[in-house]
């Protein structure tokens, strides 16, 4: 990504953030609601994350615009793993962001879960159901009601589609809990499969190889440590990289940026508010808690 900056007059304090109550959360799914009062146009570089992201545009008017590889998508989108140089912005009024772990994405999006490196219109993924979902969410009286509606929609899709193999799901969870530091051979031994079989099934069902998934999870942990202000050398050690140069190369691979630039990325600056479970420095959010001021 060429830049992490937003326009100089952009301020996250103009954005209200709502998080759902823990009791309403689905496995492998996390959500946050954003309401902007900003007079300025947003232009934010998205940083790779180990999830498929749905951006549901609830704005009236111009709404969200996503730009990647010379393409523009306006309105609600599905962002696959490893999107590369991707910027999200526009005059966003309200937006529901949904993060789907790849195991959940495989059920929620079906064949479209294999979106690695792609950004597509949500209508291309869900057809007419996308517009119906937007209408229901836009008409809801509160964010709590919107989270309930979204959980209902996603829950129905989760239960209607075949799940991934238990061995694949276990491998993904172990990749997350080990922060990407488990070797593929060890994971294959845990599920009783050959390395070749695990590689093939994981890739076909989640749209990413086990090794690439481990690198992405490890990068995500390192990126959040960088954003929390930890020195790059310390982050490299804590995240399992050989040295600081290795960290630099991996950050460059996933974002096109330096570790210093990633540390200042606005996309990560909001994570300890909208996604407190992903932050190494913030307490978990209280049920129904809202954070209107991110300064």
Image (cartoon, grey):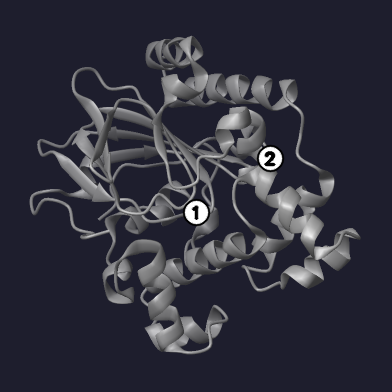
Q: What residue is pinned by disc 1?
A: 276
Q: Against 282, is 144 above or below?
A: above
Helix, strand or loop at mark 2: loop
Occupied quadrant, residue 232:
bottom left
Among numbered discs 1 and 2, the one appearing first in the sequence: 2
The quadrant of the rendering that contains the C terminus is bottom left
CA separation, marks 1 and 2?
A: 16 Å
Q: Which residue is found at the position 44% from the left and 47% from the top?
A: 117
Horizontal side, residue 31 vs residue 162: left or right: left
| Nearer-the-camera pick, 182 or 146 | 182
Is any atom of residue 148 visible in this view?
yes
| x and y percentages locating residue 16 in the rendered image | 31, 38
110 or 273, nearer to the observer: 110
Residue where numbered disc 2 is placed? 27
Decide: few, some or many residues near mark 2? Use Cα within 10 Å; few <14, some 14-19, many ≥20: few
Question: Could you say where residue 256 lies in the image, as x and y percent from the top left?
Answer: 31, 65
Residue drawn where x is 42% and y is 41% of the image: 118
Q: Do we see residue 227 in this rendering? A: no
Classify 193 as above or below 148: below
Nearer mark to the viewer, of 1 and 2: 2
Note whether 177 is above or below 275 in the view shown.
below
> Looking at this rendering, what residue extends furthest in the right direction?
192
Q: Residue at x 46, y 81 (%)?
A: 235
Residue 86 location, x and y as percent?
Answer: 30, 48
Residue 292 picture quarter:
top left
Which numbered tag is attached to residue 175?
A: none
Apparent side of residue 211 relative to residue 41 in the rendered image (left or right): right
Q: Secondary structure at mark 1?
A: helix
């Amino acid at each position: 990504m060429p830049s992490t900056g937003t326009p100089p007059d952009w301020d996250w304090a103009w954005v209200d953030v709502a998080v759902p109550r823990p009791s309403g959360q689905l496995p492998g799914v996390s959500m946050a609601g954003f309401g902007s009062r900003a007079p300025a146009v947003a232009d934010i570089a998205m940083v790779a994350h180990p999830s498929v992201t749905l951006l549901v545009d609830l704005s009236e008017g111009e709404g969200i615009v996503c730009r990647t590889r010379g393409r523009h998508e306006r309105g609600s989108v599905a962002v696959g793993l490893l999107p590369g140089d991707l910027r999200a912005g526009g005059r966003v009024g309200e937006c529901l962001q949904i993060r789907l772990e790849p195991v959940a994405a495989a059920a929620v999006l079906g064949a479209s879960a294999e979106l690695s490196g792609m950004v597509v219109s949500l209508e291309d993924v869900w057809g007419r159901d996308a517009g119906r979902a937007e209408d229901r969410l836009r008409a809801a009286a509160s964010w709590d009601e919107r989270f309930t509606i979204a959980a209902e929609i996603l829950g129905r899709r989760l239960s209607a589609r075949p799940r991934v193999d238990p061995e694949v799901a276990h491998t993904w969870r172990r990749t997350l809990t080990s922060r990407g530091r488990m070797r593929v051979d060890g994971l294959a031994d845990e599920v009783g499969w050959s390395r070749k079989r695990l590689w093939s099934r994981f890739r076909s069902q989640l749209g990413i190889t086990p090794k690439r998934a481990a690198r992405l999870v490890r990068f995500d942990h390192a990126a959040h440590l960088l954003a929390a202000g930890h020195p790059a050398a310390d982050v490299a050690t804590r995240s399992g990289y050989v040295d600081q140069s290795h960290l630099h190369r991996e950050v460059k691979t996933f974002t096109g940026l330096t570790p210093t630039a990633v540390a200042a990325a606005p996309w990560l600056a909001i994570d300890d508010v909208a996604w407190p479970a992903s932050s190494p420095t913030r307490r978990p959010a209280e049920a129904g808690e809202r954070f209107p001021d991110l300064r």
